Amino acid sequence: MTDRHPLSGPEPDPARDAGHADPPPRVGFFTDTSVCIGCKACEVACKEWNALPEDGLSLTGMSYDNTQGLGASTWRHVAFIEQSAPVEPSAPAPEGRTRLPLLDGEPEPAGAAGELRWLMSSDVCKHCTHAACLDVCPTGSLFRTEFGTVVVQDDICNGCGYCVPACPYGVIEQRPSDGRAFKCTMCYDRLGAGQEPACAKACPTESIQFGPLDELRERAALRVDQLHEAGVPGARLYGHETDDGVGGDGAFFLLLDEPEVYGLPPAPVVTTRDLPTMWKHAGAAALSLLGGVALSFAVAGRGRR
Ligand code: SF4
Ligand code: SF4
Ligand code: SF4
């Protein structure tokens, strides 16, 4: 007998666990932020493929970013983070890829080193191994696909909004115009046709890599080693551990700084993890209350005799 927790911890095959009899290998995204140039082609490709409406283009005054964050109509968001920090020296291109001018070890202009660096990162739904959004959805609008991804169906969503606070990453959002919830579907329609997601297809630097999750994890570990050897000690993976609070993400990242710098929670936990314990405690409290009420009636009845 195993003591595996049904709502958290490692889960080797979420698609099979969700009832798919013979699923294909689980797929996902490895987003290598060290080669992102902030072109936002991924955001545009997502908007175009999914016919997402425009949702405001106001500059924040805090950065050059003009889409601000993930939302009901922004399923990919490229964060621009300006930092006063030493510019990393000569970060190499991944094996077999074109070296980018920005990363090619050009000598810094006099006085520029150590003044400013830009971190750019294309964020998206994490397609969690244990997805609280899916756990709390009462209509079945959110479901686990045969590819192990998490999809929301807008024609079934009733706008209850339970999924919104359940997501530990603040990804899914209700569209203000009609209340229905939207997020990245990992291009479920394209996957079904053997195509890669539109954002990965459009990325000119292959910062967004799509494929079987096991292969991506191996590739990501090699890339971190390569960056460390090249003198980029801040390189680290985020969301790749299968024993973290959500059982690992289907979309994980190579970051160059702490997750908080990118607006990511440092230790996310599936918000439904403690529900069984909470219901057990609530049941015990209700039974104690009923017992107390029954006892008081019994004592009162005996006093009247
Ligand atoms: S990141 Fe949020 S919306 Fe995406 S699968 Fe996980 S819980 Fe659901
Ligand atoms: S996978 Fe598809 S839906 Fe998700 S962010 Fe990329 S383009 Fe948009
Ligand atoms: S398309 Fe690629 S390089 Fe351009 S912003 Fe998106 S992730 Fe970065």
Image (cartoon, grey):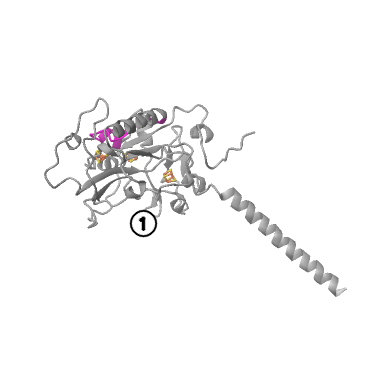
Residue plotted at (46% across, 43% down):
142
User: Residue 144 at x, y = what percent?
Assistant: 47, 38
One can see residue 196 in this view: no
Magenta stretch: residue 129 in it? no
Q: Quadrant of residue 299?
A: bottom right
User: Residue 161 at x, y = what percent?
Assistant: 45, 54
User: Residue 114 at x, y = what percent?
Assistant: 20, 47
Number of callouts: 1
Looking at the image, residue 289 lies above or below residue 54: below
Disc 1 designates what residue?
Answer: 176
Name the kind of residue labelled 1 in the image.
Pro
Along the horizontal axis of the image, is 161 left or right of 3? left
Outermost residue on the right side: it is 305
Along the horizontal axis of the image, is 29 left or right of 230? right
Q: Crowdedness of circle 1 by 10 Å Cα count: few (<14), some, many (20+)?
A: few
Outermost residue on the bottom side: it is 304
Q: Which residues are magenta?
A: 199-213
User: Residue 293 at x, y = what percent?
Assistant: 73, 65
Q: Quadrant of residue 56?
A: bottom left
Report the front residue among 117 and 127: 117
Report the front residue among 29 and 107: 107
Magenta stretch: residue 200 in it? yes
